Image (tube, rainbow, N blue to C red):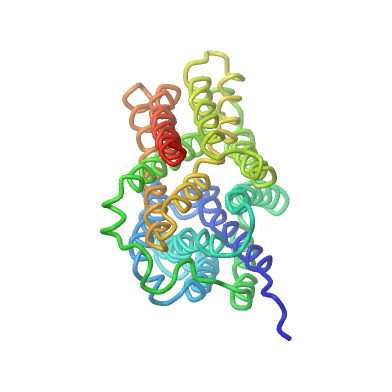
Amino acid sequence: MTSAPNYKKTLTACYLGFATQAIAANFAPLLFLTFHESYGISLGKIAFISFVLFFVQLIVDIICTNLTDMIGYRACVIASESLSALGFIGLAFLPELMDPFTGILISVGIYAVGSGLIEVVGSPIVEACPFENKESVMSLLHSFYCWGCVAVITVSSLFFRIFGIENWKILACIWAVIPLVNIYNFSTCPIEKLVEDGKGMKIRELFGNSVFFLGIILMVCAGASELSMAQWASAFAESALGISKTAGDLAGPCLFAVTMGLSRSIYGKFGGRIELTGYMLASAVMCLICYAMASLSHIPLIGLAGCIFCGFSVGIMWPGTISIMSKRLPAGGTALFAMLAMAGDMGGASGPGLVGLIAGLSGDDISRGLCAGAFFPATMIICILIIRARTASGKSKKTG
């Protein structure tokens, strides 16, 4: 008699996979000033590091539309964790073995491939598991990215405080342990197919569907709404309150990640009782208010509150959009998840860039840059209202 598959093990592996993605996104930025001082790398070059991370993830998103179905989810996630671990370890050693900037870029590029892979296949792996209330499970899954961000920022800050930032290479190797352990988890957990071979929608079919375009716009806005605030939170906290870099990291991006994780965890716990599009609409309105608080208030603490609670408002946007699209396009398959991930990354790259551009044109006024960022939650409100109107129209036709 064979035992039932342990899908909780699959979920745990995906949790750790999203935590690994958080390490990839947040660890190197904590070391930017150290790279500048230790290796003499210009700040202009250092800014290129984040671009490489997002650009490589975008390329992986595009490639995965066909590659994942060819080699399978298990091979992809094992490669994801292996490359992530290799990249973290490389970050500790390659800058000493070659030109430091080149060594850093190679390491970031390696773990960016791993990060992009888990971003594409993590959600469909969970979606394919026979869980009840999949919308709640999806939200809880994505909350582990938030808790990973909190862990990276707080643990790294404590490590640097106790052992000195000059020992950052040791910490890079310690972070590599998480994906190394997770290789075993993904090797032994049950993994199901999202759709049968050959039955998933092709890219051409997706682009011929109007609902898909709404999903793409939602994901661009979700990524932009989240990262426009998250990436400028530390600088905003420092400029608004005049506090130190360490305090700015904790008061800005760390608390932003905490509230974002709480939002996803709450929906993960009670999602079965909450209608998803209504929750997303309320969140988008709250996000618009938070951007207004951060950009228009002349009282620093109100601006900081808007920055922090923006994390709660954007929490459901990314996983909620995935759940909405997977429900409305059940045959979307890997191509759907890959294109949604690509759209989210496009928003994550363009949103902070827009904020920085407007801030620069306004005399380095971050508040004005964040005011421009309010465009994204406002657009999301419109898209959600269209989806809700279509849903209501479809129900009325069935009852009529």
Decide if residue 42 is on the left or right side of residue 293.
Answer: left
Where residue 81 appears, as percent x and y from the top left, is: 54, 69
Question: How many numbered marks, from 0 up?
Answer: 0
Who is closer to the viewer here, 183 or 325?
Answer: 325
Above-or-below relation of 172 to 152: below
Residue located at (54% from left, 22% from top): 240
Q: Residue lying furthest bottom in this view?
A: 1
Decide if residue 177 is on the left or right side of residue 326.
Answer: right
State whether residue 242 appears in this view: yes
Where residue 244 appears, as percent x and y from the top left, is: 61, 32
Q: Residue lying furthest front in this view?
A: 400
Where residue 86 appears, as percent x and y from the top left, is: 51, 71
State whether residue 246 appears in this view: no
Where residue 56 appears, as percent x and y from the top left, is: 37, 59
Residue located at (38% from left, 65% from top): 200
Who is closer to the viewer here, 178 or 376?
Answer: 376
Who is closer to the viewer here, 303 or 70?
Answer: 70
Res 89 quadrant in image: bottom right
Query: Is the N terminus in the top left, top right, bottom left or bottom right quadrant?
Result: bottom right
Query: Is the C terminus in the top left, top right, bottom left or bottom right quadrant?
Result: top left
Residue located at (40% from left, 72% from top): 69
Above-or-below relation of 345 to 282: below
Who is closer to the viewer here, 61 or 47?
Answer: 61
Above-or-below relation of 205 to 231: below
Decide if residue 376 is on the left or right side of residue 256.
Answer: left
